[in-house]
Every structure is written in C-alpha cells, then in structure tokens.
C-alpha cells in the first residue's frame, strides 16, 4: 500500500443502463436460492447491483469492504497493454503473482489475498447459503480459495459482469457447481 494513502479499491463508476438491466435479471436466480445472506462490495456498481437484485425480493444486503476489487493504484483504468508498456518488469512480477508485488500506489497482492481470505473464512463459518456480489478478481480468488487452489491460478476462471458462479461448501472446501453462468441474461 502507498504510504499515507488509503486504498482506493478501484474507480467509483455507477452502473450503466445495461448494468441496471443485468442486475434486475439477477433477481430470479437469487429468488431461487431461498434464504440466503447477501453481501456486496461497497463500490458503487456492486452495491447498486445488490440493491436492484434484492429489492423486488424484499431482502436486504450488507456491505463488506473485503469484497472490494484490488486497488490498482496508478494503473487503475489502464489496459494490460498500457501497463506492460509503462512498466514491463513490474507486470512480469504481477504475472508471477509474487505476494510482495504491489501495484504502483496501490495494493500488495499478498494483502489482497489475505483480505479475500478473510471473507472466505467468514462465509465458511456461517454454514448457510451466502450470496456475494463483487468484482472479477475477488470472485476468481474466492473460487481458488474455496477449491483449495493457489490464488495464483485465479485467471483460470471467468467472471463476466452479472454472471453467477456457485461453489457448494463442505467444511472448508468446496465443489464448483456453476461458473460464469449468464443464462439469466439470454432474454435480451
């Protein structure tokens, strides 16, 4: 983390009209889960998604800062190609997923994995259905942690906007039963 600067956890961008429609489409699958606890990232787009997806169901949600996307610092909003062009050596460290790697002015990978691990442990301890509305990096890292995989493998999984991934937990480990499902968005 940059000294003296709080983590920003990504650019605060509201949902687009398409994003609001996608959030509404999540209501049906969410209703099918029965009694579930819902937690959302405090970033505007995730919190708005949670509000839209839960409001017609009459259930609330809690905001949890552990669900924020990684703080890319000065690289926020840049494409991978732009990052690689500016600092190819640092990008190679990121690709190696070195725990001490930190985005310039942003979050250290090890701290991000610890933060996501915190929410994973809390979900496991609840021993009941939980819905997490978050961001791609967090979702992919959670999948790794629940499956017992090294978090460096997080890019092996897709996590499109408004997609649904499901891990059934059995004790501290899980079984991936649904990944990056967007079937609920097919009625465009």
Image (tube, grey):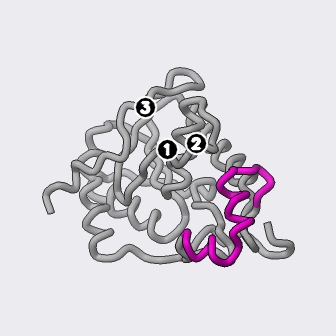
In this rendering, would 72 be left or right of 35? right
Give the position of the C terminus as an image quadrant.
bottom left
Q: Residues within 10 Å of mark 3 (few under 14, many from 20)?
A: some
Q: Secondary structure at mark 2?
A: helix
Name the outermost residue toward the left: 187
The residue pinned by badge 3 equals: 176
Q: CA distance from mark 3 to mark 2?
A: 15 Å
Q: Secondary structure at mark 1?
A: helix
The residue stretch that appears in magenta: 80-101
Q: Earlier in the sequence, mark 1 or mark 3?
A: 1
Q: Which is more toward the observer, 80 or 8?
A: 80
Which residue is drawn at the image coordinates 55% and 72% (left, top)?
A: 81
Q: Secondary structure at mark 3?
A: strand
Q: Quadrant of residue 94?
A: bottom right
In this rendering, would 159 be left or right of 55? right
Residue 83 magenta: yes
Residue 149 position within the rendered picture, expressed as x and y whole percent measured from the top left? 60, 33
Indicate whether 167 appears above or below 81: above
Give the position of the N terminus as an image quadrant.
bottom right
Which residue is drawn at the image coordinates 86% and 72% (left, top)?
A: 3
The residue pinned by badge 1 equals: 156
In this rendering, would 53 be left or right of 79? left
Indicate whether 17 appears above or below 22: below
Image mark count: 3
Residue 28 position within the rendered picture, expressed as x and y whole percent measured from the top left? 23, 48
The residue pinned by badge 2 equals: 153
Labelled pair 2, 1 in contact (Cβ < 8 Å): yes
Residue 36 position within the rendered picture, expressed as x and y whole percent measured from the top left? 40, 40
Which residue is drawn at the image coordinates 41% and 67% (left, top)?
A: 48
Q: Which is more toward the observer, 37 or 75?
A: 75
Q: Residues within 10 Å of mark 1 (few under 14, many from 20)?
A: few
């Amino acid at each position: 983390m940059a000294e003296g600067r709080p983590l920003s956890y990504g650019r605060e961008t509201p949902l687009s009209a398409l994003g609001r429609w996608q959030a509404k489409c999540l209501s049906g699958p969410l209703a099918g889960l029965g009694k579930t606890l819902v937690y959302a990232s405090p970033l505007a787009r995730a919190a708005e998604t949670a509000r839209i997806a839960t409001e017609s169901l009459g259930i609330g949600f809690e905001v949890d800062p552990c669900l924020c996307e990684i703080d890319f610092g000065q690289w926020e909003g840049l494409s991978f190609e732009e990052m690689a062009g500016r600092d190819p050596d640092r990008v190679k460290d990121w690709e190696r997923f070195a725990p001490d790697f930190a985005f310039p002015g942003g979050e250290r990978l090890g701290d991000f994995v610890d933060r996501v691990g915190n929410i994973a442990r809390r979900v496991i301890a609840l021993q009941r259905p939980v819905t997490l509305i978050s961001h791609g990096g967090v979702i992919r890292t959670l999948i790794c942690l629940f499956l017992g995989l090294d978090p460096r493998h997080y890019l092996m999984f897709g996590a499109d906007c408004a997609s649904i991934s499901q891990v059934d937990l059995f004790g501290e480990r899980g079984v991936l039963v649904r990944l990056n499902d967007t079937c609920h968005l097919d009625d465009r």
